[in-house]
Image (cartoon, rainbow, N blue to C red):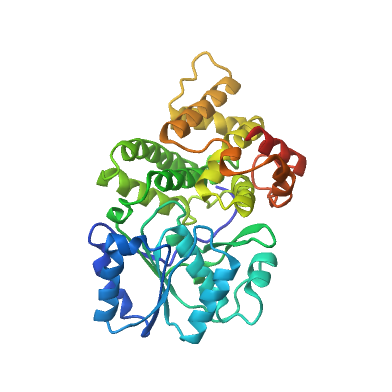
Amino acid sequence: MLGNFCYSNPTKLYFGENSLNFLIDELKSYGNNVQLIYGGGSIKKSGLYDEIINILKQCGKTIIEDGGVMPNPTVEKLYEGCKIAKENKVDLLLAVGGGSVCDYAKAVSVSTWCDEDPWDKYYLRMEDVDNKIIPVGCILTMVGTGSEMNGGAVITNHSQKLKIGHVFGENVFPKFSILNPKFTYTLPKYQMVSGIYDIMNHITEQYFSGDDDNTSDYISEGLMKSLINSSRIAIKEPENYEARSNIMWIATWALNTLIAKGKSTDWMVHMIGQSIGAYTDATHGMTLSAISMAYYRKICPYGLQKFKRFAINVWNVSPNGKSDEQIAAEGLNCMEKWMKEIGLVMNISDLGVTDDMIECIAKGSFILNGGYKVLTKDEIVEILKESM
């Protein structure tokens, strides 16, 4: 295990078919004004909206609605949400939806009482929060981001062609999150598959770093094997509760800071993927899947032993009679085959990327140094071209 670290996660999770019942108990801890945050209205079609409204009314809460959160929340929407929260002196932000809705709620929570432009303060200068924070609660209807148990909040600025995530501290983590796997059943296959790969990539971004014998890597391998198995079942049986519950639980543990402990972590696939999203508004998980294979094949020689371990421990590749390079390559081939099997987008051109965007996407990709190789802008361009 590398370095010294402190681990704390203050989010309380309620998991299972009856988890929504615990919302009543949680609401007792907050004031009367609740900003109900949701996306395009699917929760109204499913009936979940009515259930939540009834609980809020039963608890005597004043409901301030904030719908229409888009899959890649914009800075304009953030300003709108802050205005709603400030004018209504909101006591709790209740996010009902997937990662974008939860991310947006956390962004509103830190931005409403910020004296400066929150985009400049939190997303360009990456400063810490030093103002009042509105507490957040989450009710998940889509899994993938792990936003229900972390401090991440990704916001898109179309005018600046930037999509940036700020990972805030534990004071911004949701106070509670409700995870009922059945709430994810109505999700379209494309969104379910996108979420599955978002989970996988969260794990690999942390796994492919460091060369020590790290307990976090053993946990990551178990999570990946469970995800691969459950994904194959969920594709064929979307309402298989065991598979969907496993996927939901893996998503939470993939990015609640646990498996990052003792790791340097990589995150370059996310940096490039987010830049693609800023230009195309493509679904987040698909921006990751479309560039992953080119990226991992690029860095494999620099982290060969970990890629070899990945092949053997996650994909059950037999090492007999093979060189380290052959074993690692076979593991990545297995990963690519699985990605195609579950229906992921494998080329950025399918997401709307054109040749004239590539240089700008590369320029908008933040370069991090936690992985096995620090990329240059030219190397990012190469990866993007190989992903076309």
Q: Who's the residue at 66% across and 79% down the image?
A: 116
Split into 4 quadrants, where in the image is the C terminus? top right
Relative image position of residue 336 (x, y in whole percent): 50, 30
Q: Who's the residue at 57% across and 43% down the image?
A: 351
202 relative position to 187: left or right: right
Relative image position of residue 249 (x, y in whole percent): 36, 51
Can the viewer see residue 184 in this picture? yes
Task: Please determine whether, in this image, residue 108 is positioned above or below residue 333.
Answer: below
Q: Who's the residue at 54% across and 22% down the image?
A: 327
Relative image position of residue 94 (x, y in whole percent): 39, 72
Can the viewer see residue 212 in this picture? no
Choose top left, top right, bottom left or bottom right for residue 136.
Answer: bottom left
Q: Who's the residue at 62% across and 59% down the image?
A: 164
Task: Please determine whether, in this image, residue 32 is positioned above or below residue 145.
Answer: below
321 relative position to 192: left or right: right
Tally the marks.
Answer: 0
Viewer-side residue, 9 vs 387? 387
Viewer-side residue, 140 vs 74? 74
Viewer-side residue, 150 vs 115? 115
Relative image position of residue 314 (x, y in whole percent): 44, 32
